[in-house]
Image: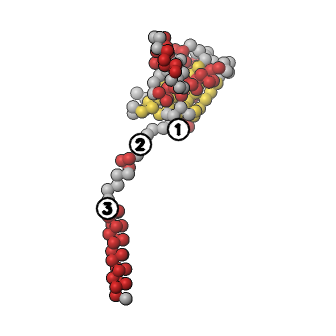
Amino acid sequence: MLTRLAHLAATIAVACAFALALALAPRDTHAQLADAKALTAEAVKTMLATAEATARANRWNVSIAITDANGDLLGFLRLDGASLGSVDISLGKARTAARYARPTKVYADRVLADTLTILSVPGVVALQGGLPIVVDGRVIGAVGVSGVTSAQDEQVAAAAIAAVVKP
């Protein structure tokens, strides 16, 4: 009986020591996780409203796509009179800007400079009008616009981003 009590006491002592060690151990699990900004539904609504206002003020019939950092659609608006083709193009521009972390004009310029190899990169839409949304040096999403000239498309995208990201 005494051996049994001694064994039980030793087991309890080891368990308590282990629990105390866990409680006092530094917690570095937080250091393994990144704090990242993300677009909220409210931010997406604000960007769409600003893009729409910019396009309407200029009488531009465009499609506007907003994606997250992965290029997945968060918000979309096709203004009356915008071409059906602008739907896919605006989403393609936003996806390209998000996934490759660059304005789509970079790829349009490469094609104009006779660097056609860029066209073999999967998912690249080499047309100006897609801009990444960058916060604290990280891409958190993108805006793609299509329907007018490429420079005008980019103007609408830039206005949308400026509505929620302050320099």
In this rendering, which labeled residue sits more in front, label 3 or label 1?
A: 3
What residue is shown at x 61% (from left), y 17% (from top)? Answer: 147
Q: Report how far apart the C-alphas of labels 3 and 2 lie in the structure.
A: 25 Å
Figure quadrant of residue 10: bottom left
Q: Report the residue marked by disc 3.
A: 24
Placement of the N terminus among the 4 image quadrants: bottom left
In the depicted structure, whether residue 25 falls above or below residue 159: below
Cα separation between marks 2 and 1: 15 Å
Looking at the rendered image, the disc whose residue lies closer to the viewer, 2 or 1, is 2
- Marks counted in the figure total 3
Label placed on residue 35: 2
Q: Residue furthest top?
A: 113
Name the residue: 49% across, 30% down. Answer: 99
Give the mark nearer the N terminus: 2 vs 1.
2
Q: Is residue 151 left or right of residue 77?
A: left
Direction bottom: furthest residue = 1
Give percent across and percent down for residue 66.
55, 29
Which image quadrant: the C terminus?
A: top left
Residue 84 in sight = yes
